[in-house]
Image (spheres, helix red, strand yellow):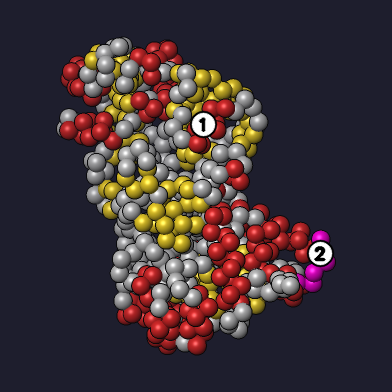
Amino acid sequence: MKEVYVNVRENIELVKGSIHKMVFVCPDLPEFLPGQFINLAVGNYEYGALLRRPISVFKHDAAAKTFEIVFEVKGKGTKFFSRLKGGFLPATLFLGNGFTIPAGTKKVALIGGGMGCPPLYSVIEKYKKEGIKFYTYLGFSSREKAVCLEDFAAVSDKLTIATDDGSIGEKDFITNVFMKDVAKIKPDLILSCGPVPMFRSLKALNLDIPTYISMEARMGCGIGACYVCACATISGNRRVCRDGTVFDIKEVLL
Amino acid sequence: MKYYENPLSLNLCGIDLKNPVIAASGTFAFGFEFSKLYEIEKLGGISVKGLTREPREGNPSPRIAETYGGVLNSVGLQNPGVETFAKNLLPFLAPKDIAVIANIAGSTEEDYCYMAERLSSEAAVSFIELNISCPNVKAGGMAFGIEPKSVQAITKLVKKYSKKPLIVKLSPNVADIALNAKAAENAGADAISLINTVQGMAVNAETRRPILKNVFGGLSGPAIKPIALRMVWQVYNAVKIPIIGMGGIMNETDAIEFFLCGATAVQIGTANLIDPLASLKIVEGLRHFVERNKLKNLQDIRGKLIVE
């Protein structure tokens, strides 16, 4: 991990007034593992939003020294980011343990929900060249919020979409849709990122497949020093930012 | 650089510190994470995460809320316990040229005495900081730190078991901070640190619920700096023992304000969360300050607030 300044190269409004994609350039770009996050300062803290915002990485390009994030405007921090046209922000990168795929893995199912979808792209980006097949399942509330579909379609071996209102893909929970396919695709590994209710449904499927989930929490420092972002596990409270964000689904008390 | 040639150096209760900038308990864990970002030996000291006799899981999540100019937390002393600290975490800090302050929080008087005695046997521990001011635990914590009488009683008792200089960390959630500071001094405290967090709460207007699962939390950050400065100044005028000032210090200018109000050293807490390099930047900023003002030692400005 490194403390750096990141330069805003692009800021694209993917969904009006809601979801943005930002592209950053950083000449001193550290090593990156898929699923890791950045802790991004809300400009000058003297303007009120003191804490940094932890946001997962969507794409990472080591050669170009760029990376991208996708976020939804929720509070004053994300509102501030959404208005940026350029400039530099302090950030700590890259944080968290990230997703790892053990050697010999052939088929991976990726299950994303809402704003938990974009970080899964970085998994395919890193492991695609190793010949692993990726079956991607993405769930959204509606067509309007279903972002990054073209990106996922271009790299996934099969992309399946579900929405709460059926405006695109199947009208069902993404975990139910996945359940219908799982016997057919027989994945060796499931990697997931999304809201806790989705993880609960995933756990309830009771599949005998190693499953890792990326948790979200309100954080303080983002580096493991303040013990704010606790995640209850079978072995007690763990730090989401440092012991995670990726945990074995069997260990997390959901 | 020799101790006496370094204009930021100080002697705190008989122990030489290379500078008066100390990482505050609960914002720096045990130093390991920050050591990935910079050489933590550049700081004068580290007050480790509040230790309890047995490991603690802390409070349920969410444990943090952002407020205007501040941060509200309700971590509730999650820590691995005093034994794991001594055996597994202290060895990381031991070889480093940095003063280690062991912050202890008990549920009972016996807990405090046990921990003070246990940690006194560790050569790598320079000071013991008596945390009688944590607002986030039901038993113990702040309960010992509200009434001057109980401050005096617990300080006197723990002093018997501590072979290291004893710093008493005071709560701002009290009627008269000067009385509590005097109570600690009378009971044999070697130094006072203040302020711990100010008790507060945050509400989500949409969900009509408190943001913290624990409902109440401790407020820190720049929002509490005026309270902290006032209390440091009051305590400076009431006691003779050294004061370690803290509460919302974000940069070297904030730190200097505390020195002017009588602090011998400062602790940096919330700023470490906002800018992980904050403590380091404050050391550098203080160095520039002494050069610019041609001070022989930063301590020359201690308590030099001009009140007309």
Give B42 or B268, whichever is nearer the viewer: B268
Vertical comparison of A181 with B113: above or below: above
Residue at the spot 48% in from the left edge and 65% down from the top edge? B196
Label 1: which secondary element:
helix
Residue at the spot 21% in from the left edge and 31% down from the top edge? A201
Q: Which residues are magenta?
A: B292-297
Q: Residues within 10 Å of mark 1 (few under 14, many from 20)?
A: some
Mark 1 sits on what residue?
Answer: A79
Mark 2 sits on what residue?
Answer: B293
Q: Residue A220: horizontal and vertical position, in percent?
A: 46, 48
Identify residue type, mark 2. Asn
Q: Residue B258: horizontal and vertical position, in percent?
A: 64, 66
Label 2: which secondary element:
loop
Identify residue type, mark 1. Lys
Give the number of the disc on residue A186.
Answer: none
Give B236 or A68, whichever is nearer the viewer: B236
Q: Residues within 10 Å of mark 2 (few under 14, many from 20)?
A: few
Q: Residue A230: horizontal and vertical position, in percent?
A: 35, 49
Instruction: State the CA–CA distance, disc 2 to disc 1.
Output: 42 Å
Label 2: chain letter: B
Quarter holding residue A25: top right
Label 1: chain letter: A
Q: Is residue B169 visible?
A: yes
Give A180 or B130, whichever is nearer the viewer: B130
Q: Is residue B164 visible?
A: no
Whether residues under marks 2 and 1 lie with C-beta atoms below 8 angstroms apart, the answer is no
Give A34 or B27, whichever is nearer the viewer: B27
Quadrant showing the C terminus of chain A: top left
Residue at the spot 17% in from the left edge and 30% down from the top edge? A205
Q: Residue A190: horizontal and vertical position, in percent?
A: 28, 29
